[in-house]
Amino acid sequence: MSTLDLIIGLLKILIILAIFMGLGAYLTWLERKLAGHIQGRIGPKLVGPFGILQPLADGIKLLTKESIIPSGADRVLYYISIAMALAPALMLFSVIPLGPEFTIFGKTVKPVIADVNIALLLIFAFGSLAVYGTIFSGWASNSKYAFLGSLRKASVIVSYEVVLGLSVLGIVLLAGSMNASKIVKAQEELGWFILYQPVAFILYLFCMLAESGRVPFDIQEAEAELVTGYNVEYGGIRFGIFPLAEWYLNVVALSSLAVLLFFGGWLGPSIFGPISPAVWFVLKVSVLVFFVLWLHWTLPRLQARDITHLGWKLMLPLALLNFVITAVISFVIFS
């Protein structure tokens, strides 16, 4: 690797960290505004024009707020769980391409940190690591409420990780690759995969909500039952990292992946003229993220038994059936 390649790689990491950490913070403002409109009340409006500086004020408050560690807590796991909650969410963006490759100063640059052939496999691996942050935080806090919340979350992740993996296998068969960029290029020839895999997309959407702890799958943070769930014993910025990673960074990452898998990535309809691929990608991801936030303030929460029943007894057989049908049709057509 040359010095220039190293510099470009470091710049990619810094840019992605800056964009998505800032985006995660301002999604809190967007959600509060959206919730205010849905519920007929006023969202943030006092700090900055239209309340746009509210995330900055919240960040300063969390940074300066006293953080008390329970006396019986396991301090090593207590701190490790914070990193284990944030790191997997950020690692997801390392293999998600944000657009087609381009040339600058004679150098071809791919807008992805690591353009690997097993990108989907790495994404599922990174997503699975998030359960450790949940389990560690509940166990290390030495609180039965936090531990119950962490077990609830773990049961959801175990259930829906299986369905999530099976739901995208049909896409892998159609594209013939697990590389995200090649999946997008395959849709340039075959059309958006949502046309071929509508059932897979519905299953993926449910799994995305479950993975990110969004309504109707937010049983791990049932405030009326478990105070606030697995992170109840965290305070200040330590408390804020958990929803930032789970509710926002995960949602953006999984929405970006859904756009790449089902909606052609940065490809746009030609009838709209020569619009930048980056604009198409951002627009598609924004629509999907908005839909997830909208659902959060519209649907009621499911019970824990209903969530596991839905995952294992309904969605898992559907995912298997969809994969088998896709495999048979692909074999007949391409053989």
Image (cartoon, rainbow, N blue to C red):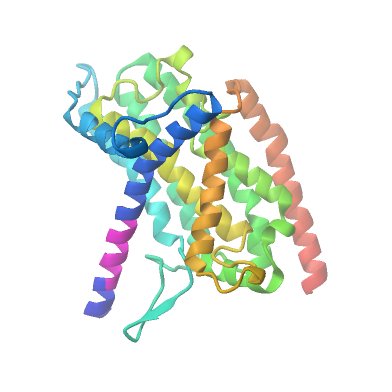
Q: Quarter of the image for the N terminus: give it.
A: bottom left
Residue extending farthest to the bottom is: 106
Residue 69 lies, in percent from the top left, at 21, 22
At x 44%, y 68%, the residue is 115
Foreground: 119 or 112?
112
Quarter that holds the C terminus: bottom right
Residue 283 point in image, percent of width and height: 53, 56
Residue 266 included in the magenta stretch of the image: no
Residue sitting at the far front: 49
Q: Residue at x 25, y 78 (%)?
A: 4
When the figure is inspected, residue 302 is found, relative to residue 125, above or below; the finding is above
The x, y position of residue 178, in whole percent, is: 56, 64
Camera sees residue 179: no
User: Where is residue 282 shown, x and y percent of the image?
Assistant: 49, 57
Magenta residues span: 8-17
Q: Is residue 141 above or below residue 199?
A: above
Task: Look at the picture and state if 164 lies above or below 293.
Answer: below
Please say whether residue 13 is one of the residues in the magenta stretch. Answer: yes
Q: Residue at x 54, y 65 (%)?
A: 266
Closest to the observer, 166 or 17: 17
Q: Which residue is drawn at 37% across and 47% down?
A: 23
Quarter of the figure with residue 273: bottom right
Q: Nearer the viewer, residue 207 or 33?
A: 33
* Residue 61 visible in the current orientation: yes
Dominant secondary-structure state across the stretch colored magenta? helix
In screen coordinates, is 82 left or right of 228?
left
